[in-house]
Image (tube, rainbow, N blue to C red):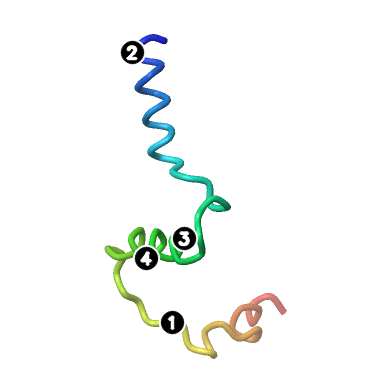
Amino acid sequence: MSLAQYLRRVLEEKVRGPAPAALAPAERAALWRESVKDLPHTPPLSDEAISRESIYDSRV
């Protein structure tokens, strides 16, 4: 195996990580928390913002 092939394989494994089915639920949750820890905190949308009337108001 060439160096380029080896590096590609190693990088693909790092990007993919372990298969989710191979991890316990607590491990999956820990990986998810780690992956989102640096995302900005944004408040949830209000009920009005996601209401059917608000979404489809201009399509009538």
Q: Earlier in the sequence, mark 3 or mark 4?
A: 3
In the picture, measured across the screen, residue 24 lies left or right of residue 4, that is right
Q: Quadrant of residue 30?
A: bottom left
Q: Earlier in the sequence, mark 2 or mark 4?
A: 2
Callout 1–callout 3 Cβ contact below 8 Å:
no
In the rendered view of the protein, which quadrant contains the C terminus? bottom right
- Disc 2 to disc 4, C-alpha distance: 34 Å
Label annotation for residue 33: 4
- Disc 1 to disc 3, C-alpha distance: 23 Å
Point 43% across, 82% down: residue: 44
State whether residue 24 is above or below residue 13.
below
- Amino acid type, mark 2: Leu
Dot 2 crowding, Cα within 10 Å, few <14, some 14–19, many 20+: few
Q: Nearer the viewer, mark 3 or mark 4?
A: 3
Q: Quadrant of residue 12?
A: top left
Q: Earlier in the sequence, mark 2 or mark 1?
A: 2
Q: Position of residue 38 (x, y in %)?
A: 27, 63
Q: Earlier in the sequence, mark 1 or mark 3?
A: 3
Point 38% across, 28% down: residue: 10
- Disc 4 to disc 1, C-alpha distance: 18 Å
Q: Earlier in the sequence, mark 3 or mark 2?
A: 2
Mark 2 lies on residue: 3
Label annotation for residue 44: 1
